[in-house]
Image (cartoon, rainbow, N blue to C red):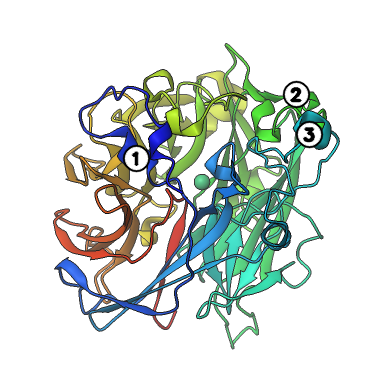
Amino acid sequence: MTPAATASAPTPSASYNRADWASAFRNVVSELSAVSLNAARGSVPPELSGCLYRNGPGRLERGGRWVHHPFDGDGMITALRFEGGQAQLSNRFVRTAGWQAEEEAGRFVYRGVFGTQKPGGALANAFDLRLKNIANTHVVRLGDQLLALWEAAEPHALDPDTLETRGITLLDGVLKPGEAFSAHPRFDPGHHGERRMVTFGVKAGPTSSIRLMEFAVADDPGSGVRAGQLLAERRDSFRGFAFLHDFAITPQWAVFLQNAIAFNPLPYVFGQKGAAQCLASKPGEAGQFWLIPRPGSAAAERHPQPLRVPAPEGFVFHHLNAFEDGASGELVVDSLYYADFPSIGPDTDFRSVDFESIPEGQLLRCRIDLERAEADPAGAVRQHWLEQRCCEFATVHPARQGLEPRFAWMAVAERERGNDPLQAIEKLDLVSGERRVWSAAPRGFVSEPVFVPRPGADAAAEDDGWLLCVVWNGARCASDLVILNAADMGEQAVLELPLAIPHGLHGSWVAAGA
Ligand code: CO
C-alpha cells in the first residue's frame, strides 16, 4: 500500500528524503481503542491531563485508485489521552454517509473537491455536483460532543470518549441542512465574561456572505445558558467570490481576509476538475480584509457595517492571531502568507510535488490603522515579516487568543530559506525575534503543534506548558507523538504509536474535567 516507489523526483534539499515524506501517504488500516503507550524516550509529564484530538485524511485509496489530493481523504480522528504520566491511543474514521457508501462499494462513489474523480472519466463525473462531506479538517469539543469539521458543510458529532459517530449535527437547529460551517473556530478565552467558540460559515458566489456565530462552551447555571448554545450571530454580504478558510478574533472584531481569487465552475460542472481546482489567483490584484465588529462590542456600535481594507498581495489560508493595540489604535493581524495561490493541477501526482516551484508560507504582521480605514483605506495598512522561514500551523497560548502574544509556535522547514516539507517546530519570541527550534529531520515530518498550558500555571507565563505534535517517522513508517517543553523546546517525551497516520490537518486539546 505504500506509494513510496512512485516518488522518484529529485530532492533539492539535503534535510530530507522524498521517499520518507511520501511514505506517509497511505491508508489507515486499523481502528484502535484505548491502547496503552510507553515512552520510547523521556517520560510523559504527570500533570499532563486531558486529551489531544487530531483530524486528517485517513483513507487515500479505494479499489486501486488514489485520491487526486490528500485533502480529499476521509476524516479519521486520533485521540491521545493523558493521565498520571500514562498515555492511551484510540482512532476512528468518521462514519460519514460518503465513507459508508464507499466502504460498501469498495470504490470512490463521490467526486472530491480537490480533484478526485469517480471511475469512468469526465462523462461519469459531469453534472455530479453532490458534495461528499468528508469531515477531515479539524476536531473540537463543544458541550458533550466532539465536532468533526469540514468547512463546506455541517459538522459531524462524535462521542468524545468512544469516538463513535453520532451523525451530522445541526447544533440544535442553529444550522440549516447542508449549511457551511467553518473548520476553523476560535476559542475566545473570556473577553465577554465567559469562554466562547466563535466561528463562521461562508456562502460563496458572485456575492458572498459570512454568518458569524458565537457559542457558549460551558453550562452557566446562573443564566441558564447551556454549552453549545448560540449566544450571538450576525450576517454580512459583500460582492465577489470569497474563499475563507480561517479567520481571527479580537475582543471586538472578527477579521477575515478575502483572497484575490476567481472561481470558474465550468470545468467542475463538466467533470474535468474538482471544485477547488477551479480556483485561480487574479494576477496583480490584492485581497482585502473584512473587519466585522463582533455582536455586542463597542466596535459594533461605532461601525454598523464591516470595514473593508486592502490587504497585501499574496494568498492566506491561516492566521496566527489578531489583537487590538490600544496604544496605537491599530488592529494587528498576523497571517501565514504565500506569494501566490498554490493551485492543484489536473495532471500532477501529489507525491511528486516540486517544492521548489511553489511558494512557502511566511508569517506577516499587518497593522491596520482603524481611524484611516474609513477615510483612506489604501494607506491604512503597514506590514512587516515576523518569520520568513517556511512555516505553517502557527499557534499562541490559548489565553492570548485575541490579545497581543509574546510567543508563537509553528511548524517550520529544516532549511531557513526556500520551500520544503515541515520538519521542525519553532518557538518565536515576537518581541525580541529570538528563535528556538526542535527538529525531527532528517527522517521526521511534523504536523501542527498544539500548545497545552501547564495546569495551574500563571497564564502570564505564556510559555509554561508543552507542545504536542504528531510526527511522521520515515524510518519506522509510522507516527510518533512528541511532547516538547514549550519554554526551551527541549524534548520531554517521544511515544512511538502503533499506527501510521498520514500527514494530518488540525487538532485541539481538551483538558480533563473541561
Ligand atoms: Co486549516
Where, quadrant-wise, is the C terminus in this rendering? bottom left
Is residue 192 among the parts visible in the rendering?
no
Pick out the residue farthest to the right: 127
Whether residue 10 sits left or right of residue 172 in the image: it is left
Residue 452 rendering spot, x and y as whole percentages: 32, 65
Query: What residue sits 59% from the left and 23% below the top?
Result: 347
Q: Which residue is mark 1?
A: 21
Label 3 within 8 A of ligand 1 by Cβ:
no
Mark 1 is on which residue type? Trp
Q: Is residue 480 above or below residue 278?
A: below
Question: In the image, which is nearer the foreground, mark 1 or mark 2?
Answer: 1
Real-space Cα separation, disc 3 to disc 1, in angstroms: 37 Å
Residue 341 rendering spot, x and y as whole percentages: 54, 25
The 10 Å Cα crowd at callout 2, few under 14, some 14 to 19, many 20 or more, is some
Mark 2 is on which residue type? Asn
Instruction: Tell whether label 2 touches label 3 (CB within 8 Å).
Output: no
Mark 3 is on which residue type? Gly
Query: What residue sits 69% from the left and 34% below the top?
Result: 274
Q: Is residue 479 above or below residue 407?
A: below
Q: Which residue is mark 3?
A: 205
Residue 177 rendering spot, x and y as whole percentages: 81, 60
Residue placed most toward the observer, 1 or 188: 1
The 10 Å Cα crowd at callout 1, few under 14, some 14 to 19, many 20 or more, is many
Disc 1 on helix, strand or loop? helix
